[in-house]
Image (tube, grey):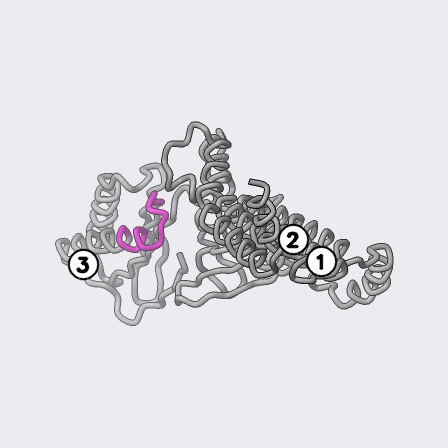
Amino acid sequence: MQAFSEFIIELEEQPVVRLITGILIIFAFWMLSSGIAFLIIKMIKIKEKDSKKIKKSSFYYPLVAFIRVLGIYLAIFFAKEKLKIDDQVMLWITKAFKIIITIIFAKGLATAFSNKSSLISSIKRKSKKKVDESMLNVILRAIRAVIYVGAAIIIITELGYNLNGLIAGVGIGGVIITLAAQDTAKNIFGGAVIFLDKPFSVGDWIQVENFEGVVEEITFRSTRIKTFENSVVNIPNSKMSDASVINWSKMELRRYLTRLYLDINTPLEKVEKLIENIRKVLLKNEQIDDDSIIVKFEEIIDNGIEVMVSSYTDSIDYETYLQERERINYKIMQIVREEKIKLADNAHIVHVKN
């Protein structure tokens, strides 16, 4: 028995055996990593029964990566003497191990604070108030930035650099950077104004300067708008905060306005009947606010009579509004033809943008 024990000890001292043992350690940790990570997440989320949701956890894959890297580190540590790895090299291997682990868990923590993570989804579901997606995205970006900056500080410290000297250097260079980044500072300030005042949100239909479209994203630097021409424009927040922004999505009602130009010889009785019939048609339309209906003989123009038709519809969406406007136009033209009213030729027409 003693001879067998001595044989085992002597066998363990062989470099080849140590190397094979190290490889087996790596293999074992690699094969067991998924199962161990699953059990750890399961212990944290005791009530969760769905294995797919457990594997979708932000920390599942970081834990898998950590266990595998740990296996490699332990294998090297186990075989370092027989592989003649000196203390200095082992010190750098240990540093590399710590840096890799820092990156892995910083990535996992940052993923936990993304809009699609189960943590944030759960918070949004439990929240009693409606969550402003644009504001939430900026907050999550700020949290992720803090996480990555913290990880960078840990890595820099681990590499042996003096942070005091680095901060001093950044302070000197900061003056130069600040002078060169005044526009960026203005954009960040403009972004803060937008988030605080909330003149518009992601998904809103807005018009600013010569651009009109749907807001796709709001960052601290710029606002991205998808125009109706199917192009994308990024407008600096410094301009957005100073410009006059029309938010069409905030409308409760949208105005319908048109003008009819009747022949100057149209009998006044027919004009009165036309006005009355148009008013009746509008009153029957459930999408139109009855109190907003105005149908008037507005002006006597060159070679014609101008009748103004105005009302407000609850069809806010642009496409729906155009469909509603088209239906009203058909009804009006039908009345004009039924009354056999002639429209004016070469009348002075005023174009109104709705």
Name the residue that disc number 1 marks. Answer: 90
Name the residue that disc number 2 marks. Answer: 77
305 in magenta? no
Depth order, front residue of 310/296? 310
Coordinates of residue 298 in the picture (x, y in percent): 36, 53
Residue 340 sits above or below residue 295 on the image:
below
Circle 2 — which element? helix
Residue at image x 47%, y 65%? 232
Residue numbers of the magenta segment:
312-324
Query: Of the residues shown, which amino acid type is indicated by label 1?
Result: Met
Query: Of the residues shown, which amino acid type is indicated by label 3?
Result: Ile
**Left or right of residue 300, residue 26 in this image:** right
User: Image quadrant for the N terminus?
Assistant: top right
Q: Identify the mark at residue 341; answer none if there is no mark.
A: 3
Residue 199 in view of the camera: no
Circle 3 — which element? loop
Q: CA distance from mark 2 to mark 3?
A: 98 Å
Residue at image x 40%, y 40%? 53
User: Image quadrant for the C terminus?
Assistant: bottom left
Coordinates of residue 4 in the picture (x, y in percent): 55, 45
- Whether the residues at callouts 2 and 1 have beta carbons within 8 Å, the answer is yes
